[in-house]
């Protein structure tokens, strides 16, 4: 019978049928961070249970850790140090590889896992973090879970999972130059809404997806959780294989050869059927920006905010954002610009932003911050001189972490400040108390920081 | 985990679409490496007059005397979207909520509810509208029904496994550990087929 890629991976990991459509699914990789992972390890130990396969488990410091230069265990977040120290102690006690502060492998969990070759095509990978769907970009079945489920996976190497439905989003054609994977992700969110893929495994396919490099695929898959998807996945191909070769935890020698042969077989059958299908013409995707308090409230730069009719959510979002129907988002005056997060803080993101920033300067009064996604991204950017471009343009250049993608206490953007941000969530008070976040690509963030107002990079004055 | 059979309570209506877990428990309210002490931060951004303050905003539904004892929350669609933080479910449970009624739930949040003794009741928005009243409603989990005081009653779906766990207050890890040998056999077979997956 014809199968989708997801169904193949489900079958491959299916240990037992638990009835009612629920399977006991083998878990190959577990990732933890100090905000939700430390509590899982602590709670597991308190229950007298062990981590069953510590070599398959990895932890990092990303959510709570400071990103200011010269950081230590001390945090601006009032109680952040306890998260760092308790996670460190629990990871050491459990024998888990921890990418600690100061480790060259430290960084945002969804940035370092591909970088280290921890995520591989065909594996199941879980992490108590909703953006784990990012890692489906490498052809893994990777999904976000809660802390109690993480404890379950740690103790048993398995999870009890209700089999999700499948959806394929096929993007045909070619994205225009100047249109990025982030624009595609926001286009999809605007089109199908924040519950548009609810509970489904979304397979991204089509020529425009195939043409993306791994970092672009990670950005696209990252935002599947903003569609309420179970996760996203992209079938592995030569791009995936080339990306993984030589990564620290990727297989080597004969095992590499065997793995590659297996990975080449991982694709949906041509006659496989999906529960939902969506087709998108890449030519319809334009540079996007969000206007509201949900990623679905996004529109092409230059378009005007639509009328909401009787929709309370629409009017509540407008009031929160200090906007009116019919207003154009492009041209809105900004207070701050942020480049960072598991969505858009990889080397290619920083390179593209740097091309715009080179020889330019952030507009007066704009607070601009760049937080590389990992210590390795930061080091590679510095080797290319990208840090100097950012700094000379007036950006703060930070240590790796999640940083001001959310407001954990302590450091945040200000009350009712308008921020252009390369992150994934524009929820109320996500980036600071009553902060007004506009999601966009790193290019749009860079161009907007320079102009001081939300700006399409293609309209920036030539140097 | 406390078993759940039936519950009769006033239901607090917080009918907004896309109530995200940042709204349920803001990052800044997650102050320790613990599953406890979170009820105080529940809906902090809406519940209090100031960020980091603790003066109740009288306009917020949970601060109104009629709903002080509410153990059921009525919500909008895509309830619990956003961050996977289980702190959202822990905060709701510690505050006293045992059931949430909404047109749809985010899948991770829904799972977190079940693991913390909160029944996710999925009903159409029109049915939820009829539950917004001043008298208590009843959630009957064995029968999978919600009964309104006017006599109307609505069936809701729930996965067999989730129902079983909620009814009996079961710990999923204990259940799975009964299959320990099956899991070990599976892993041994899979290791031979896909050795590169196993890092030791």
Image: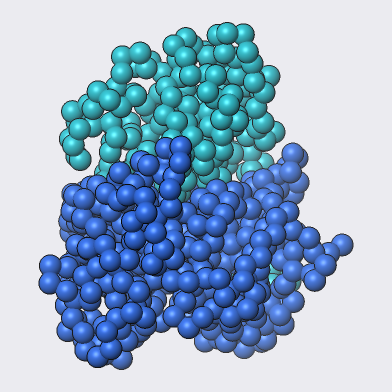
The quadrant holding residue A418 is bottom left
Q: Quadrant of the N terminus of chain A?
A: bottom right
Apparent side of residue B172 relative to residue B39 in the rendered image (left or right): right
> Where is residue A329 drawn, in percent x and y?
33, 61
Give the residue drawn at x 67%, y 41%: B178
Rendered image coloring scheme: by chain
Name the one closer to the observer, A85 or A144: A144
What colour is chain A? Answer: blue
> Which residue is nearer to you in this view: B192 or B139?
B139
Up-down relation of residue A396 to residue A35 (above or below): below
Residue A459 image offset from top left, x and y in percent: 33, 79
State whether residue B146 appears in this view: yes
Choose top left, top right, bottom left or bottom right for residue A66: bottom left
Write down the colour of chain B: cyan
Classify A334 as above or below A312. below
Total numbered labels placed on residues in the image: 0
Q: Quadrant of the C terminus of chain A?
A: bottom left
Q: Is residue A66 left or right of residue A350?
A: left
């Amino acid at each position: 019978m014809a199968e989708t890629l997801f169904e193949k991976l489900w079958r491959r990991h299916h240990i037992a049928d638990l009835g009612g459509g629920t399977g006991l699914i083998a878990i190959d990789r577990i990732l933890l961070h100090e905000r939700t992972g430390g509590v899982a390890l602590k709670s597991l130990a308190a229950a007298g249970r062990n981590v069953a396969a510590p070599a398959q488990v990895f932890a990092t410091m990303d959510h709570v850790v400071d990103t200011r230069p010269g950081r230590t265990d001390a945090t601006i977040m009032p109680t952040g140090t306890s998260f760092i120290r308790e996670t460190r102690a629990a990871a050491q006690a459990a024998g888990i590889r921890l990418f600690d502060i100061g480790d060259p492998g430290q960084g945002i969990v969804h940035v370092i896992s591909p970088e280290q070759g921890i995520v591989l095509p065909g594996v199941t990978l879980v992490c108590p973090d909703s953006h784990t769907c990012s890692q489906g970009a490498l052809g893994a079945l990777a999904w976000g879970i809660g802390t109690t489920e993480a404890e379950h996976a740690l103790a048993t190497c398995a999870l009890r999972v209700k089999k999700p439905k499948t959806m394929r989003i096929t993007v045909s054609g070619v994205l225009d130059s100047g249109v990025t994977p982030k624009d595609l992700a926001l286009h999809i969110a605007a089109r199908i809404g924040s519950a548009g893929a609810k509970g489904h495994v979304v397979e991204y396919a089509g020529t425009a997806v195939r043409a993306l490099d791994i970092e672009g695929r990670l950005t696209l898959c990252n935002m599947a959780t903003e569609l309420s998807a179970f996760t996203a996945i992209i079938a592995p191909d030569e791009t995936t294989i080339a990306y993984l070769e030589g990564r620290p935890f990727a297989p080597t020698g004969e095992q590499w050869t065997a793995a590659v042969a297996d990975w080449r077989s991982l694709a949906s059958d041509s006659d496989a059927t999906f529960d939902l299908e969506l087709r998108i013409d890449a030519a319809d995707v334009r540079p996007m920006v969000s206007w509201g308090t949900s990623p679905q409230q996004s529109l092409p730069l230059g378009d005007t905010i639509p009328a909401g009719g009787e929709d309370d959510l629409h009017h509540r979002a407008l009031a929160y954002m200090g906007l009116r129907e019919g207003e154009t988002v492009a041209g809105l005056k900004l207070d701050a610009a942020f480049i960072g997060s598991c969505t858009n803080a990889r080397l290619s993101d920083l390179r593209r932003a740097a091309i715009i920033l080179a020889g330019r300067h952030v507009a007066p009064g704009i607070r601009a911050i760049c937080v590389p996604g990992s210590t390795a991204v930061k080091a590679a950017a510095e080797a290319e001189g990208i840090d100097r471009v950012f700094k000379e343009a007036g950006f703060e250049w930070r240590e790796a972490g999640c940083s001001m993608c959310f407001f954990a206490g302590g450091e945040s953007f200000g009350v009712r400040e308008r921020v252009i941000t390369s992150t994934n969530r524009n929820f109320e008070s996500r980036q600071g108390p009553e902060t007004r976040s506009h999601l966009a690509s790193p290019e749009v963030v860079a161009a907007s920081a320079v102009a001081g107002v939300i700006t399409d990079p293609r309209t920036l004055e030539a140097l | 985990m406390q078993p759940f059979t039936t519950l009769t309570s006033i239901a607090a209506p917080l009918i907004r679409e896309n109530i995200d877990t940042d709204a349920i428990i803001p990052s800044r309210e997650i102050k320790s490496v613990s599953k406890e002490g979170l009820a105080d931060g529940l809906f902090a951004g809406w519940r209090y007059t100031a960020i980091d303050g603790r003066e109740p905003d009288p306009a917020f539904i949970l601060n109104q005397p009629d709903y002080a004892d509410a153990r059921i929350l009525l919500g909008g669609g895509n309830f619990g979207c956003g961050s996977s933080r289980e702190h959202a479910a822990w905060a709701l449970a510690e505050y006293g909520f045992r059931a949430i009624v909404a047109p749809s739930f985010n899948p991770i949040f829904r799972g977190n509810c079940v693991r913390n003794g909160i029944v996710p009741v999925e009903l159409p928005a029109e049915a939820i509208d009829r539950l917004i009243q001043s008298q208590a409603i009843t959630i009957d989990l064995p029968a999978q029904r919600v009964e309104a005081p006017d006599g109307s009653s609505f069936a809701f779906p729930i996965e067999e496994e989730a129902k079983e766990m909620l009814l009996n207050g079961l710990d999923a890890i204990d259940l799975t550990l009964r299959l320990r040998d099956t899991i070990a056999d599976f892993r041994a077979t899979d290791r031979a087929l896909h050795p590169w997956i196993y890092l030791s």
